Amino acid sequence: MGANYKLLFLILSIINISSGQETLEYYKKLINDGLQSAQNYQLHTDARMYHGDNVDMIKEYGRYDFVIIGGGTSGSVVASRLSEMNFQVLLLEAGYFSNDTFEQFLRFAKPFHMYSDLNWGYKTVPQKTGCLGLINESCLVPRGKGVGGNTLINDAIYSRGHPQNFNLWSKITGDVSWSYPKILQYFKKSENFHSTNEKAEAMLSYHGTEGELNVQHRVPDFYLTDTFLEANKELGYDITDMNRPNQIGPSIYQYYSTKEGRREDFGTVFLKPNLDKPNLKVLTGSYVTNIVVNKQTKRAHSVIFTNSGSTYRVKTDIEIILSAGVISTPQILMLSGIGPKKHLQDMGIDLIQDLNVGSTLRDQPFVDLRFSSNVKIPAESLDDQIKDYLKGVGTLTAPTVNQGVGFYNINTPPGKKPNLEVFSDIIEYSDVEKKLMGYKPEIYDALWGSNNTHISFVIENILPNSAGTVRLKSNNPYEYPLIDLNLLSDPNDTDIEVLYQGIQLILSMSETQAYQKLDLKYLSKPLPPCKSFEFRSKEYWYCFIRQTAQTAFHPVGTCPMGASKENGAVVDSKLKVFGIDGLRVIDASVFPTQVSGHPDVAALMIAEKMSDVLKFEYFSKIPDEEVTSS
């Protein structure tokens, strides 16, 4: 009998080893294929792949209580929450669900995940005041395409913003329900926070622990995290929790959508557990061309979309929820006759409602400084990285090696909200990155100097004043819109000055004892377009900023909420489109200002808040026998 057990144990051991090797080979192939695919991928320049075969023949797709356009950061949450009340909900999404794909590895979030079918692939029109060192002076504007939206391709950083951001929203809208004390509950509702780093400051009273969305620190962190924290202490900054009210100072990154080190997009977190509900229909591969509004009653009653080559009309009994994102939401509104009067007339579109749609696009510009050092990246084979990853730890589980981040207050009174974010990482020279990030070759090479590895400090203006636009290229719904970020264009140069002061902060930080132990030295050569200025003078840095500034891929505000349309608002404080019945916008388009953080988390909060508003407003429309506890 004992011999039989030994034989069985040996067989099982061989099976486990074989299975483990197969798993290892599977992930190695997944990563290598993903990296190669990103290098060869060509971004789309339009949406012609969704064009119907016979656009004049419209098929009926029935009626629903709510039709939600866009299954991204906000739309996936709203659909999930409304399905709790047995409303009949249809969610239309152009992309698809993400499965066990390359995008699960957060380490490759930028730039590799941007080069796939999970990104719409938008770019700006040529810029005049920023992105000048990029090919065609055009910035990338990545937007997630698929169920989960931006959470399919972003860095998954859980950063809410400062309480004063939301108190300002309350003042702008005249609605106290947007103040921080009122909306904190909606940040906490979906959060399942785990403090997984003993060095991190975590104020648990400001975190939720019973929600669906996993939030945690990456483990283990690299010693550069300690260096960053120590350098900040030398400059007088204490460690804080980046999501507590006192946001100023260094923190250790908190990540969302990560379970055991893997990306979990919002489609996976919020929608997949509800797909078996009979009252929720998620229709992927659906491209919305316009919303139909009755010209007499001004009521939005139908949505036109294509799917698998056919064109459909779906009707709504309660409301249409537009959650297509900061670029697509204004595009759909304007194609539906809702937007700036003159622009719609120029496009040959019948005007339904004259509103300031697409006129207040804001994004967070950043630059980075690159330093040589004596830091040695530990040699770690891809096999070992994958083994760590399968345990939920290691380099593949976070977008940066260093886990330190700082929020600072530049040129504003003490105690105010931060307007500058800084973090650092170790980066190796890569022809692939040069191509994917879109730098002109002479700019990229000057940034690197003669080094192949460096420590990079990213300096980000998180509360810019400059505003750009989203405009239609034509009345063809399959043409991508014209996107003008208008970076660093504010007439008083406040935006560029914040970045300049951020550069000075990092140069000071590089001189601290903590960083001098690493023999830190600024390595970039003078940029060719800036050689007429004294190297590292203020005039040089201003030129440097305009050449190298890109965006953090955090656009907001193209359909801002406010007290009245006369003040430029598109939606009211309940996010109803002014002058249109039965139509609401629920996504980052409605931000009236930027936030001192990463906007996807605030967009999640908005979705949670508005789901409760909709439930309360329309609860009486559910038949008694259909009401279930939520």
Image (cartoon, rainbow, N blue to C red):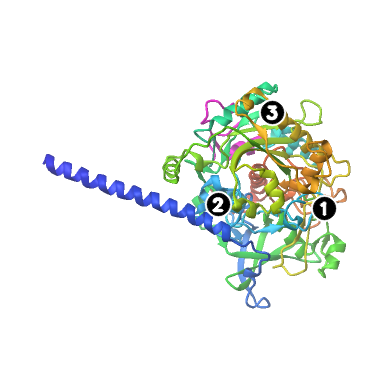
On the image, the x and y values in percent for residue 111 come to: 61, 50
On the image, the x and y values in percent for residue 408 come to: 72, 31
**Kind of residue indicated by mark 1:** Lys
What residue does disc 2 label? 267
Q: Assess whether residue 48 is covered by the magenta stretch.
A: no
On the image, the x and y values in percent for residue 84 come to: 55, 49
What residue does disc 3 label? 509
**Kind of residue indicated by mark 2:** Gly
- Residue 136, picture quadrant: bottom right
Q: Assess whether residue 192 is covered by the magenta stretch.
A: yes
Work out whether mark 3 precedes mark 2 in sequence or the reverse, and give the earlier one. 2
Left or right of 4, for residue 579: right
Whether residue 105 is visible: yes
On the image, the x and y values in percent for residue 584 come to: 72, 54
Separation of residues labelled 3 and 2 (CA atoms): 40 Å
**Kind of residue indicated by mark 3:** Met
What residue does disc 1 label? 128
Work out whether mark 2 precedes mark 1 in sequence or the reverse, and give the earlier one. 1
Of 222 and 79, the residue lying toward us: 222
